[in-house]
Image (spheres, rainbow, N blue to C red):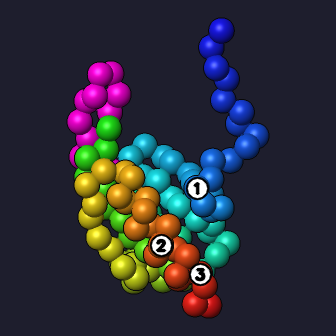
Amino acid sequence: MAASVNKGIPLEYKGHPLCRKDNIIYYGSMSDKYVIMLQITDTKKVDDLDVATRVSVQLQLTDPDLKSRDRIVKKTEKDGLYAAMDVASVWLERALSSK
């Protein structure tokens, strides 16, 4: 029997929502002041899975009135999704707690 994915429950990491479209993952809520954009820039095949090897991390303001380049507060690049999510969770927590 195949496992089914419950589409009614959003994916979360450390209490913040995750939303993926192709090679971009948004971490956080667009209703907050800040959100993290993770862009997978390089992958490698492990068995039959694509595994992220380079991930660009950006802390962004969610203000729709700003140009996209002006929304970027911080950015870095990490080796692998785990390292990128680690930085992303720290950046997002710090940014949201300094309101």
Q: Is residue 82 above or below residue 72?
A: above
Where residue 40 appears, as percent x and y from the top left, is 33, 50
Q: Is residue 43 above or below residue 61?
A: above
Q: Quadrant of the N terminus?
A: top right
Seen at 62% across and 53% down, the residue is 12
Magenta stretch: give its range: 40-50
Category of crowding for the residue at label 3, using alpha-carbon neighbours closer than 10 angstroms: few (below 14), some (14–19), many (at least 20)? few
Q: Are marks 3 and 2 in contact (CB under 8 Å)?
A: no
Calculate the distance from the C-alpha at mark 3 to the C-alpha at mark 1.
Answer: 15 Å
**Majority secondary structure in the magenta region:** strand
Q: The residue under label 2 is which amino acid type?
A: Val
Query: In the picture provided, is 28 more to the left or to the right than 89?
Result: right
Provide the residue designation for mark 1: 13
Q: The residue under label 1 is which amino acid type?
A: Tyr
Provide the residue designation for mark 2: 90
Calculate the distance from the C-alpha at mark 1 to the C-alpha at mark 2.
Answer: 12 Å
Image quarter of residue 93: bottom right
